[in-house]
Amino acid sequence: MYNTFYGFSGKPFEITPDPTFFYFTPSHQEALDAMIDGIKNRWGFVSITGEVGTGKTTLVHLLLSRLGENVKTIFIFHPTITFKELLRTVLLELGLNVVEKSEESLLDQLSDYLLHHLDRDETVAVIIDEAQNLSEEVIRELGKLSELKPQISVRFQVIFVGQPEFNEKLNLQGLRQLHRRIGVRRQIKTLNEKESKEYIEHRLKIVGCSSFEVITPKAISMIIRHARGIPRIINILCDNAFLNGFSLSVRRVDVDIIREVISDMEGQPTQKLPIIVEAVKHFHLLPFRLNCFQGKFLLALLSAFVLAGLILLTYGSPKRTPTITRSIESIKRSPIDTGRLSSNTLPPQVMTKEISKVPYPPSERDSESQGLPQPSAPLSVSPPLKDEKGVLEAVITVEKRQTISSLSMKYYRMTNSTLIDLILDFNPEINNAHLIQVNQKLRIPKITKEWLINQVSDRTYRLHVGTFWAPDFVKPYRDESALKGKRIEIIPRKVSPKDTWYRVMVGPFDDKDEALKVIDLLKEKGLLPLFGGVPKTD
């Protein structure tokens, strides 16, 4: 939206992980080197920790792009699983046929693969993101691997990537066995003031600009003070600042815009009206001088006109606003109810069979006991909002050892259950998210905000905010102020004979514009997995 106005060749402060924009601090470089060396030298276990928003997930994507073909990587992005489920995921990602067996049988199958089917110079590396969410049982069992199966530890490397709480968990009684076996530990530090300035300059330089051209030094200082060294917060502040600057036609973002963005993010009223401030700044340009009384009178008159204009904009034409990041409270809300939401956005041009033949059955884990909704009829379908760039990223032929997860990493530079769910929507003939056939045709959809929006029969809109491995992930949305007054529902979806995932749907919204504004707000807060967000369950 604002790229052309400021002369950017791309969007410099997107919060979605993108290695192209990665800024290396000494701690980031040390962490990347430790992961590469740990895998190359087969150290067994490596731990990388850092605060939320410091670039851990982006660093993982960089790691994956730098490993050779002799390293087979498995990216675990759903750490709230059992040890048995983790083993099944590893075997499936390695392209093995897994029949439901005991934990011991799965370990035997992994050991057999590493000893007899893996070339001598090959290694299997399992990267576990958000490792602080691993259960004590899983951590304990991983620590016992080298004792149970000594041959596994030689070619089986585990990289833990998580928040500092992971180190605290390792100190618990009973988990110290793994604690002692971690060969390398690195901590990603927050940016200092100098690094924060260089970070902003670095990202602007990549899109063909410099900070001097588009943002004042005082505005940069305010951003740095508020962000406290967290790159993600810097991105959010800068992105919103340029949106507001564009909406006000301000060529160089100043402290007033930053102050307004911070106020909007924190849900506080803005301290200054930008239009009045700009008018006062330019009083000295008047062709005549005003005495004190005349100046105050003119300011009061100008303020009255601006206030009247704001009232007219607010109540006479609610869809117009002078800033992009206006308060969510201005969005019209509807009462809460518990009706069922539609959850499919399959475009007619890529459907191979009616969606009514692929309903979302209840979980085999007794979802009724969890208070989850039970679909009594097939979910209704509405065509997606049309994307002017087209609906497909690519149509590919599946190659040996490719999985939906690995294809997600290839085309989106990340993978999670929401992205896999979206790919399944475009390929309804697949009935097992863990199994695709060699030479099978697979449609890879483009990622756009519009795919999160469902239009339903009553001409309202609903958002598919994410698909998760467990229903617990609904909690951040129930606590989110931006969704106050909206209906939130969990819809089970069967993705394999053994696995049920859960779609979180939110609505209703009166029009597409309202839904898009909420998408932007949730995206800024890291609550949309489609764009790399990681909602927290605790």
Image (tube, rainbow, N blue to C red):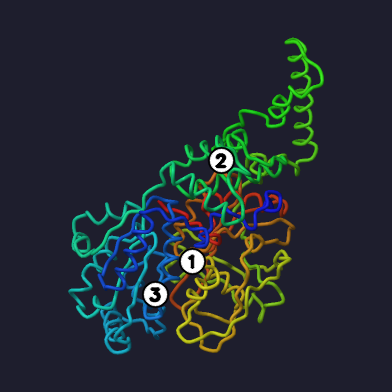
Q: Is residue 515 visible?
A: no
Q: Position of residue 371 (x, y in %)?
A: 47, 58
3 and 1 marks in contact (CB < 8 Å): no
Q: Residues within 10 Å of mark 3 (few under 14, many from 20)?
A: many
Spatial CA distance of label 2 from label 3 is: 38 Å
The image quarter in which residue 10 lies: bottom right
Picture layout, residue 180 above or below residue 284: below
Residue drawn 74% across the image and 36% down it: 314
Which residue is identified by label 3? 73
Picture layout, residue 346 above or below residue 129: below
Which residue is identified by label 1? 416
Between 413 and 19, the one lying in front of the other is: 19
219 left or right of 99? right
Residue 265: image tag: 2
2 and 1 marks in contact (CB < 8 Å): no
Of circles 2 and 3, the one toward us is: 3
Q: Residues within 10 Å of mark 2 (few under 14, many from 20)?
A: some
Residue drawn 34% across the image and 59% down it: 30
Q: Residues within 10 Å of mark 1 (few under 14, many from 20)?
A: many
Question: Mark 1 or mark 3, which is nearer the start of the sequence?
Answer: 3
Q: Position of residue 4 (x, y in %)?
A: 70, 53
Residue 6: image tag: none
Q: Position of residue 386 (x, y in %)?
A: 73, 66
Q: Position of residue 35 (x, y in %)?
A: 33, 66
Picture layout, residue 365 above or below residue 49: below
Between 275 and 179, the one lying in front of the other is: 275
The image quarter in which residue 179 lies: bottom left
Q: Which amino acid does the dot numbered 1 rest on?
A: Asn
Spatial CA distance of label 3 from label 1 is: 15 Å
Between 367 and 139, the one lying in front of the other is: 139
Of circles 3 and 1, the one toward us is: 3
Q: Which amino acid does the dot numbered 2 rest on?
A: Met
